[in-house]
Image (spheres, helix red, strand yellow):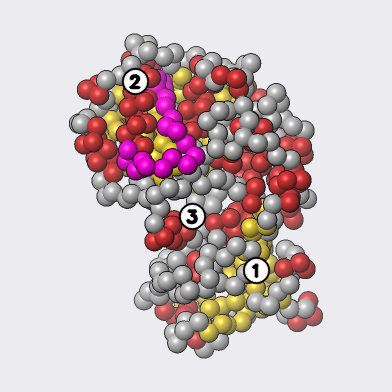
Amino acid sequence: MGAGNEKILPPVTALTEPYWAGCREQELRLQQCDACGQYQFYPRSICSHCGHNELTWRRVSGRGRVASFSVVRRPMSEAYPAPTVIALVDLAEGPRMMSSLADADPDSLAIGQAVAVDFAEWSEDIFMPVFRLVTEEKQP
Amino acid sequence: MADSLRGKLAIVGAFDTAVGVVPGKTPTELCVEAALGAMADAGIGRSQVDGLITCNAFAEPIMYHAEAVAEYLQIFPRYCFSVNTGGGTTFTVLHHAASAIATGMAEVIVISMADSLRSSMTREQAKRVQSSTGHPQFEQPYGITVPAYYALIAQAHMAEYGTTAEQFAEVAVSCRAHAAGNPTAQKREPITVDDVLASPLIADPLHLLDCSLVSDGGSAVVVTSAERARDCAQAPVYLLGVGEGHSHEHISQAQNLTTSGAVDSGRLAYEMAGLGPGDMDFAQLYDCFTPTVLVELEDLGFCDKGEGGAFLQTGATRPGGSLPVNTHGGMLSHCHPGNPGAMFALTESVWQLRGQAGERQLPKAEVGLVHGQGGIMSSHTSIILGREAA
């Protein structure tokens, strides 16, 4: 971990590189099981639904809904602004992932709100997937 | 097999060091002091101990921690290990110790845990505590803090069941009311729901007083067989039931945010004991943050799912209530030195069941439940203890 004024950068592995490569290209990519067709998150060497070991990276919609959230008022370090909204997002394709909500008003958040992915450039290699609230009309 | 451990093991020694702000003592010294205190309480000499279990200390990590403590004590066990996991560690370890005694791996096991989060942590060590939680690629980088992980559970419970911040605050108020009767507790000044809500927001909906303390301290117990226990200095406290439930590690992978693995650990413990929630004279429930107690009350069957908030508002968990919870004050008000945090709920249960709890002694304490969880409601162990072996 870096000094107190640096964000935590994800330690990318060979298995997860396609995910982060997708983020650099402004695409959210998930693994889809070749056997059962389910999507999963986080990336693994096996399908978390059926155990099959052949999975294919697919671009997904980047749409989802807030499953839960918290407003971090006391940040872990100076690198993180406060307040920051952390959220669990249920993606349209099924999996749940943690992220943050960009430009969200902490006082008007609710579970179930529709969100869409965006990407924040943290370094040359790391573009972090974050989410923004979207109006219901834009939901597919 | 459900009753395989029932009544076969007993806790025969218990000891807490000074807790709270305890400068000038290393975690190892606190661990040794706790172990010696528990052995003296049991009337067990060093040469009689053939098992030792410790937890590692953030403020003084040692690779072979239990071996180091054994060396310090000059005991030479045939069963010896340390654990690195979080607060759920304590009761899981007790489960293992019980199994080890039942299978003959050891006869007299000391479980001793200590850390010095308040007085001995370097900045680097404090950061390591923070980064020990959460997925390094897919959670930590977002800057989520430990209170915020639990806030995700609280927020989901509020949305699903209409639970309120006032109801979470009841947990802190109740624990503080118990701590007021405990001279060793770090925080004893009574607080109100309004005090909790007026304390600074840390991670919505959790306020400062919804969060447990940061402390120094050590605590230990001595465990042995029911037969051997009869020769010890104190009245044995018997293990009647134990069960575990492990549902996930990362909160984003939890199958259910508002119902936990405590359902499984509780069911197994009740089955082994042949008892139910209504038989418990008290419960010591893991309280790193107030929502955990509310969820545990529901998942362990002390009230219906979704009714935890209303149950707390009846005052049932307070001193004099129908189910006193965290009679020592819990980690919210007694102390929380990190990994050893739940040990103090175990020693408190031993003293309550022996009738040695002083001014906070419950009028009826024959059977009680202790519950630990670790991770983010990830790893659960429930233990039922009693004055009688069956």
Q: Which residue is mark 1?
A: A83
Residue drawn at 77 percent across, 68 percent down: A108
Q: Amino acid at mark 2?
A: Ala
Return the residue at label 3.
B249
Report the residue at 41% width, 60% height from top.
B123
- Front one among B34 and B266: B34
Residue at image x 50%, y 82%? A122
Q: Earlier in the sequence, mark 2 or mark 3?
A: 2
Q: Distance from label 1 to label 3 (Cα)?
A: 26 Å
Dot 3, crowdedness within 10 Å: few (<14), some or many (≥20)? some
Q: Chain of mark 1?
A: A
Quadrant of the image occupied by residue B292: top right
The image shows residue B219 at horizontal and vertical percentages of 42, 33
A86 to B15, vertically: above or below: below
Do the residues bearing badges 2 and 1 touch, measured as CB atoms within 8 Å?
A: no
Please tell me the numbered disc located at residue B289.
none
Going by the numbered disc 3, the residue's amino acid type is: Glu
The residue to which callout 2 is attached is: B40
Residue B3: horizontal and vertical position, in percent? 46, 24
Q: Which of the 4 image quadrants contains residue A75?
A: bottom right
Amino acid at dot 1: Pro
Region rendered in magenta: B4-29
Q: Is residue B314 above or below residue B62?
A: above
- For the residues bearing labels 1 and 3, Cβ distance under 8 angstroms: no
**In the image, is residue B13 part of the stretch drawn in magenta?**
yes
Q: Chain of mark 2?
A: B
